Amino acid sequence: MDYKQSGVNIEEGYRAVGKYRELAALTANSAVLNGIGSFAGLYSLKEYFATMEEPVLVSGTDGVGTKLDIAFKMKKYDTVGIDCEAMCVNDVLCHGAKPLFFLDYLACGKLDASIAADLVKGVSVGCRETGTVLIGGETAEMPGFYDEGKYDIAGFAVGIVDRKKIVDGSKIREGDALLGIASSGPHSNGFSLIRKVIPDLNEDFGGMPIGSALLEPTRLYVKPILNLMEILEIRGMAHITGGGFYENVPRMFCPPTAPDNSFRAVIRDPLNPGYDGLWKIPPIFARIAYGAKYYGKSSSEAAAQKEGEELLRSDQEIKKLMFNTYNMGIGFVLALAREDVQKAAALLSEKGFPAWEIGWVEKSEYKSPSDNYAETIGELRFV
């Protein structure tokens, strides 16, 4: 028995790498010192040592998760690569870093070079949109470990920031405003629940299969935020990923060391009819809420949507579940001095990133550092 007979097709791997090389070349710049196919990617930092007092590398890694299952079932593979890149570079951005380069890891049971190239095509698209170089990666064919036709994709991003410009929450003050920036949908989180409560991906959703709506890729916030940082001070940032508002917004705060720097986020409830000018929760979240409440119950698309909207308004348990799992239409949050909020919102909207003042920062009861990370970093409440 040879390697191919055991289930690993080396020739198909070579074909995939050839396609990757073309996609990576579309993202390259003058700092790249070698190409795809070497044992490691080489990236020169020369220009940054000349322009920064103390360059700091910032790294982040993430994957797409079970959203991939929807891509397989819809046979659409060219958007989840964008998700993979976005989840990593948006995290790196939270500390004020400009993403430099990205590596991906692709694993499958049986390699199809065309499908693999579609997955990496999405990575390439995301890299070009954020000015990040796809510098390398790995494709692993593991027959008998992954089911045939199933792929997993994860990534790793490295960015750079001058140490004096690191955003770590240390400049956040009581009374600062919280600016929320629109998401494109669930992004890449909560899909284990979505797959349970929306089993029919061909269900009509506003004139399209709901599976297509769910594959809308994660928004890439890198360029507009980096541009904004050149104009005004951003004191804190949060990428709203798994764990929704409750887990991620408090992560922008430094762990408190004294009462003077113990803060919590206060979020205006977009479902409170007393608030004008807040964001509208995208319809997809009402549909998910309906499925979570009435799991296994069938209903027309219109009825499920209407009932889901009512659940978000009236069922506190479902509402907490949704805001603790999904971004609910806000993919990124900034902490700013109050006098900068209107200017920031206007500049972001001009770039195609609608933004709203969604809350503020207030003092909270000081808690000494604890093994419970959630207790240590801060709190959040809705009003």
Image (cartoon, grey):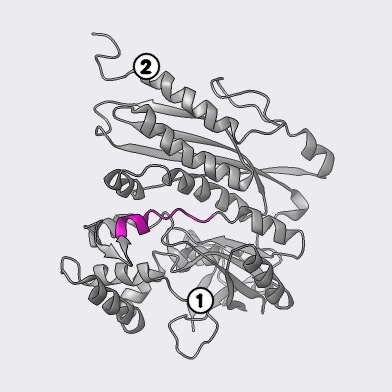
Please give the residue where the numbered disc 2 appears in the rendered image: 10
Precedes in sequence: disc 2 or disc 1: 2
Residue 33 counted in the magenta span: no
Label 2 to label 1: alpha-carbon separation: 50 Å
Q: Amino acid at mark 2?
A: Ile
Residue found 55% across the figure and 70% down from its top:
367
Q: Secondary structure at mark 1?
A: loop
Q: Position of residue 109 (x, y in %)?
A: 29, 29
Please give the residue where the numbered disc 1 appears in the rendered image: 279
Foreground residue, 376 or 34? 34
Residue found 55% across the figure and 83% down from its top:
277
Residue found 29% across the figure and 37% down from its top:
150
Outermost residue, front side:
207
Which span of residues is magenta-colored? 210-219
Residue found 33% across the figure and 46% down from its top:
71
Q: Quadrant of the N terminus?
A: top left
Q: Amino acid at mark 1?
A: Trp
